[in-house]
Image: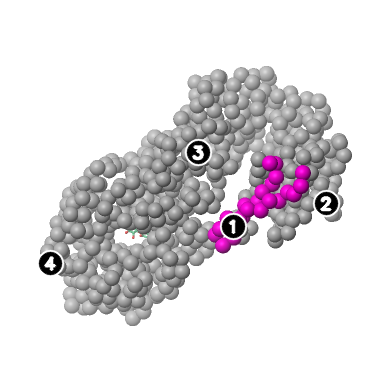
């Protein structure tokens, strides 16, 4: 959890509770429990309301609570006496100002404690023999509070508390629906108000109980998908888009069941070739949110290759979301602007520039010792009306262009290392120069003029021609090649070509063709940069996990190619979280079915993130698994 500083609480191998927290971007560790009697028998449950509350079963089987308030620790023993000893991990929650804790006693009773008027009130919630709990309760929310547990009768039970009080429900019936373990996957499926519990029956089958339209319905999963022999482990579920369930079969294989709108399908879920799973998998829900362990920060790995690895920055998210900013700094060593240096945003009126946003981003880049790509001086969209519809003649337009470049590039000279001087000048249908107002008013030499102006304004800046659909060898790329050869022959100062790489897994991808294309430009003495990578998946018809794997593979292969190719030093993505991307607007496809970037909307790393790690640290991903399993 994160109340300003990210915190992780866990039980170490000596049964002491440890706290990991970040201070100035560096992880610190602090032991919470002290002395033998404070050791923890159960894993801690942690809650935050104002202060941080850590609840656990102590070594003496009493329930203990530790409050953490601005670094100060206060210790309590909550339960007292034999009858209140606890037999598992307590779960708590906060409701209406009171703190509630639900726990299982050694005799199987599930009890409830409530902190009200500065004292704890104790209620026994279930008593009858058949309802005694054999598994720890788990807490889930939707509106009211829900606790699920496995009864001693082997059936799944639910405790619900709402304003009226507690209700107790039995969810499964009949011998074949009994449960053989805890391992309850539970959650909102496909973003609908639909809850589901997944469990293993005594015969090894995977069953589900779903809460749809206010009632629980029992389903047996297709046994061909979940063989009876399976499921010898706990299950875990995780979400992104679809509902995913991971489990270990009796043969020790990790299997994945995925529920999409088409129904259940079964997959083997190893995303990365080096990954080895030695214990029950915990699923991606538990990788959970940022932060990532320091040794797996992309920047840490990229630095080893002297690689510039980064993303474009969306200004409004940058201004409003501290996690976004933190990730920028921690994961990446290069950024570009998404929009703010484009002609329209920065030069809205003929006599007025708006430098505020760009100044802020450039300062941020400097403060954090990052590198900056400026995007883009000359393009055919996001231009101000005064420019596009001003009725300018060739001479006037050249003057405007030169003046604009001198002003913008000059202002950030020494601070913006790369400029996309001209963006998208070749038309993909005709493979001729795109018919833009630049071409109409100035003529084809507008590119030469722009590059000369940029060189004059900052002689050290590295000047790039940037385009899309030009990464493979194809007619468009050939046209760009010819155009650049012409520029070089005329002595135009151009240093490199950018491949935007807005790609999709439903379209062909030939890494050898991209490499061969890079070779061509490299032979001209040019740099080749990957400038705007994102990988769309929506139009790929295979199931979501496969699409995420295909996506991961493309991020991976491009990064591997960039590392290996002498002309490539810059690998930049057009964003990093699925929450902030131009793709939904431009190409259609909605999250979670479209999800083009390596982190999901909640900053949870996706297979593509691990693929990036994997490209830079082959064999290291297995070492990452302990973090995944947390
Ligand atoms: C996109 C931005 O991401 C959007 O926010 C904006 O509305 C339109 O432009 N190729 C480019 C980028 O070179 O400038 C484009 O950026 C994406 C395609």
- Disc 2 to disc 4, C-alpha distance: 82 Å
Task: Name the mark nearer the viewer: 2 or 4.
Answer: 4
Earlier residue among tags 4 and 3:
3
- Disc 4 to disc 3, C-alpha distance: 55 Å
- Tell me what residue is drawn at x 14 percent, y 68 percent: 491
Q: Is mark 4 within 8 Å of ligand 1?
A: no
Earlier residue among tags 3 and 1:
1
Task: Name the mark nearer the viewer: 1 or 2.
Answer: 1
Q: Secondary structure at mark 3?
A: strand
Span shown in magenta? 14-36
Q: Position of residue 167 (x, y in %)?
A: 76, 36
Earlier residue among tags 2 and 4:
2
Q: Which residue is mark 3?
A: 242
Which mark is on residue 490? 4
Please rate how many residues cluster around mark 2, counting C-alpha atoms within 10 Å: few if below 14, some from 14 to 19, many from 20.
Answer: few
User: Visible in this render: residue 40?
Assistant: yes
Q: Position of residue 77 (x, y in %)?
A: 81, 47
- Disc 3 to disc 1, C-alpha distance: 32 Å
- Looking at the picture, tell me which residue is in the foreground, 499 or 417: 417
Q: Position of residue 26 (x, y in %)?
A: 56, 58
**Disc 2 and disc 4 in contact, CB within 8 angstroms:** no
Task: Name the mark nearer the viewer: 4 or 1.
Answer: 1
- Tell me what residue is drawn at x 12 percent, y 67 percent: 490
Q: Is mark 3 within 8 Å of ligand 1?
A: no
Q: Which residue is mark 1?
A: 22
Q: Secondary structure at mark 2?
A: strand
């Amino acid at each position: 959890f994160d109340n300003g500083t990210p915190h992780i609480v866990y039980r170490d191998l000596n049964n002491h509770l440890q706290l990991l927290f970040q201070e100035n971007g560096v992880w610190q560790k602090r032991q919470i429990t002290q002395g033998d009697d404070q050791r923890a028998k159960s894993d801690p449950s942690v809650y935050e309301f104002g202060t941080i509350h850590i609840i656990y079963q102590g070594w003496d089987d009493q329930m203990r609570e530790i409050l953490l308030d601005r670094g100060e620790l206060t210790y309590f023993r909550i339960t007292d006496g034999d009858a209140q000893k606890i037999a598992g991990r307590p779960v708590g929650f906060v409701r209406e100002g009171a703190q509630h804790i639900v726990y299982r006693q050694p005799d199987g009773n599930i009890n409830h404690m409530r902190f009200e008027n500065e004292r704890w009130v104790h209620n026994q919630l279930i008593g009858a023999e058949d309802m005694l709990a054999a598994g720890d309760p788990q807490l889930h929310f939707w509106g009211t509070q829900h606790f699920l547990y496995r009864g001693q009768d082997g059936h799944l039970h639910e405790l619900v508390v709402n304003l009226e009080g507690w209700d107790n429900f039995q969810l499964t019936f009949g011998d074949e629906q009994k449960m053989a373990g805890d391992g309850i996957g539970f959650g909102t499926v496909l973003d609908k108000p639909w809850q589901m519990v997944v469990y293993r029956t005594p015969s090894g089958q995977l069953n589900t109980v779903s809460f749809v339209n206010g009632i629980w319905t029992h389903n047996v999963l297709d046994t061909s998908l979940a063989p009876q022999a399976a499921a010898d482990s706990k299950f875990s579920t995780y979400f992104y888009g679809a509902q995913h369930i991971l489990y270990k079969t009796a043969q020790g294989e990790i299997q994945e069941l995925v529920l999409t709108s088409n129904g259940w399908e079964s997959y083997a879920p190893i995303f990365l070739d080096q990954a080895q799973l030695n214990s029950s998998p915990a699923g991606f829900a538990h990788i959970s949110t940022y932060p990532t362990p320091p040794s797996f920060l992309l920047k840490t790995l990229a630095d080893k290759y002297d690689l510039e690895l980064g993303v474009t920055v969306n200004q409004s998210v940058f201004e409003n979301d501290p996690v976004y900013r933190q990730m920028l700094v921690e994961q990446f060593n290069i950024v570009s602007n998404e929009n703010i240096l484009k002609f329209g945003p920065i030069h809205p009126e003929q006599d007025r520039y708006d430098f505020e946003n760009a100044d802020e981003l450039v300062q941020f880049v400097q403060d954090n010792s990052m590198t900056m790509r400026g995007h883009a001086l000359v393009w055919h969209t996001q231009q101000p009306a005064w420019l596009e519809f001003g009725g300018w003649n060739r001479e006037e337009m050249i003057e405007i262009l030169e003046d604009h470049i001198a002003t913008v590039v000059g202002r950030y000279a020494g601070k913006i290392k790369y400029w996309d001087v001209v963006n998208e000048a070749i038309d993909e249908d005709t493979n001729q120069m795109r018919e833009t107002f630049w071409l109409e008013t100035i003529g084809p030499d507008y590119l030469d003029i722009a590059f000369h102006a940029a060189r004059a304004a900052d002689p050290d800046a590295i000047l790039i021609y940037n385009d899309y659909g030009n990464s493979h060898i194809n007619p468009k790329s050939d046209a760009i090649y010819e155009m650049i050869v012409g520029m070089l022959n005329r002595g135009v100062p151009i240093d490199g070509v950018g491949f935007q790489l807005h790609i999709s897994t439903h379209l062909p991808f030939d890494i050898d063709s991209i490499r061969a294309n890079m070779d061509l430009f490299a032979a001209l003495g040019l740099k080749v940069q990957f400038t705007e990578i994102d990988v769309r998946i929506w139009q790929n018809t295979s199931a979501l996990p496969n699409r995420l794997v295909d996506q991961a593979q493309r991020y991976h292969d491009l990064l591997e190619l960039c590392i290996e190719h002498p002309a490539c030093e810059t690998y930049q993505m057009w964003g990093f979280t699925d929450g902030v991307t131009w793709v939904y607007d431009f190409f259609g496809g909605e999250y979670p079915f479209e999800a083009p970037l390596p982190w999901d909307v909640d900053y949870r790393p996706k297979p593509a993130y691990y693929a990036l790690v994997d490209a830079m640290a082959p064999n290291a991903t297995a070492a990452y698994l302990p973090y995944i399993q947390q």
